[in-house]
Amino acid sequence: MREIVFDTETTGLDPSTGDRMVEIGCVEMVNRVETGASYHCYYNPERDMPAAAEAVHGLSSSFLSDKPLFRDVAQDLLDFLQDSPLVAHNAGFDFGFLNNELSLIEREPISMDRMVDTVAIARKKHPGAKNSLDALCSRYGVDRSHRVKHGALLDAELLAQVYVELTGGRQIGLELAAETVIVETTETASISVTTGPRREPRPHSATAEELARHQAFIENIKSPLWGK
């Protein structure tokens, strides 16, 4: 199954008040394994960048001034997304901005049926716990030491690892000792596992001699606590 894990950066919190998407990062996964394919793009939002937003992601109006307009490169993004499910953290936010950009250029919105929200998954799996991306990275041992500011592609890469853990995938840092397996290439394809020599159970009951030595030891203890 092909899925796209993605994240966006924006000029603010609400596209209905004029905020715009300025960056998107996407990571392709097939059967919950990263394929190495990704998509990343910055966009000129055609408006100023509020200081509060710039403090979060570090993208200034000057930096974005020579970046493409969304309308000019939208098809590249849609070609990468195809019809795959789209995974995001607090996905309603990212879907809202992405569909707002599509509506501004009179393109069909992406169906909410394709949305997979990792916040909702995390809240169900860890009720009452902190479920920010940072908190989930800490919980699952995902290294985020290189994350100084928010960045769409970096956050998508971190989320891809977290998503695997949330959905019961591999455990990061957990390695099980492999057993030696011998496969016999016969018609029945039988499999046998090598084992060590069989050992008889070790007796755990004390012998009469051991009990006598223990009693003698006890009798030599002066003023034992259990005698008071």
Image (tube, helix red, strand yellow):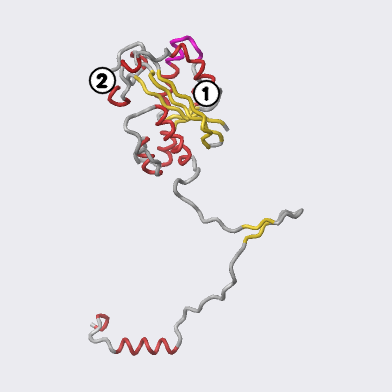
Q: Amino acid at mark 1?
A: Leu
Q: Which residue is located at x 30 percent, y 13 percent?
A: 48
State which region is magenta. 100-108
Mark 1 burial class by Cα count in 10 Å: few <14, some 14-19, many 20+:
many
Q: Secondary structure at mark 2?
A: helix
Q: Which residue is located at x 30 percent, y 89 percent?
A: 219
Which quadrant of the structure image shows residue 7?
Answer: top left
Mark 2 burial class by Cα count in 10 Å: few <14, some 14-19, many 20+:
some
Q: In this rendering, is residue 206 above or below 172?
A: below
Q: In this rendering, is residue 108 above or below 180?
A: above
Question: What residue is disc 2 on?
Answer: 51
Q: Secondary structure at mark 1?
A: helix
Q: Amino acid at mark 2?
A: Ala
Question: What residue is disc 1 on?
Answer: 81
Q: Is residue 104 magenta?
A: yes
Q: Position of residue 218 (x, y in %)?
A: 31, 86
Distance between the Cα atoms at labels 1 and 2?
A: 31 Å
| Horizontal relation, residue 201 to residue 89: left or right | right
Of the two numbered discs 1 and 2 on the same chain, state the one appearing first in sequence.
2
User: Which one is nearer the viewer's eye here, 85 or 196?
Assistant: 196
How many labels were placed on the picture? Answer: 2
Q: Position of residue 92 (x, y in %)?
A: 42, 25
Q: Position of residue 153 (x, y in %)?
A: 42, 28
Q: Is residue 25 magenta?
A: no
- In which quadrant of the rendered image does the C terminus lie? bottom left
Task: Name the outermost residue toward the right.
Answer: 187
Which quadrant of the structure image shows residue 6?
Answer: top left
